[in-house]
Structure formats: C-alpha cells, structure tokens
Amino acid sequence: MNIDLEIEALDKGGFKILKLKGRVDANRSLRLNEAINEVIRGGSYDLVLDAAGVDYISSAGVRVLLMAYKELAKLGGSFALYRPGESVTSIINMMGLSALLDRKSVV
C-alpha cells in the first residue's frame, strides 16, 4: 500500500492537470491543498485532478476538493475529478458531491 501522496503537474489544452497517486488523508490533504493553491496563484483556473492512482480519500481530502471546486467556480474556472477509483467515487457520491466527478476525456 502506498502511504505517501505523489503529485505530478501537467499542462494540457488549457487545463492544468494534477496526477495524484497514493492516499489523500488528513495529513496529506494539506499537501494537496498547497498544490491546488499553487496552480490557482499561477493563474490557471481550469483544473483536473487525475485520481486514478488514489487508493483512499478521507473527509479532509474531500473538503480540499470541495474548497477547490468552489474557489475555481468563483474565479470563472472549472474543476473536475477525473478517473477516480471505485472507493473514491463511492465516498464522493455518499457525501452528495457527485458534481466533483467529471467524465470528460481531457487527460
């Protein structure tokens, strides 16, 4: 089991993509929040989180996603959680936040 969180930033077609691998728990959600804020400070307001490599997300991690979603909407941008695994999708849906999920093929 991967206990760290790896974040790789990519640019593709006007979108900033953060490829995530590992766990997004209470401790690692702070790192994700910093990476998202860095993207926004850099002037990119269309963000895709490629979550194919995420094997766990806590409520703290979901909170980071929701805050990013709201902040980018306020700035006229967009946010999408792309390719989340079954466990992440289940948690997002259970919390009533299916708007965070996106089926677009951007990555």
Image (cartoon, grey):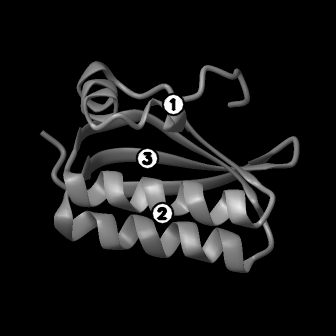
Residue 44 screen position, x and y as percent: 78, 64
Residue at (57% x, 74% y) in the render: 37
Residue at (68% x, 71% y) in the render: 40
Q: Earlier in the sequence, mark 3 or mark 1?
A: 3
Residue underneath mark 3: 20
> Closer to us: mark 3 or mark 1?
1
Is disc 2 in contact with disc 1, using a CB cutoff of under 8 Å? no
Residue 76 screen position, x and y as percent: 81, 59
Residue underneath mark 1: 101
Q: Earlier in the sequence, mark 2 or mark 1?
A: 2
Residue 53 screen position, x and y as percent: 37, 35
Residue underneath mark 2: 67
Q: Give the camera-side residue of 93 and 44.
A: 93
Kind of residue indicated by mark 1: Leu
Kind of residue indicated by mark 3: Leu
Residue 79 screen position, x and y as percent: 63, 47
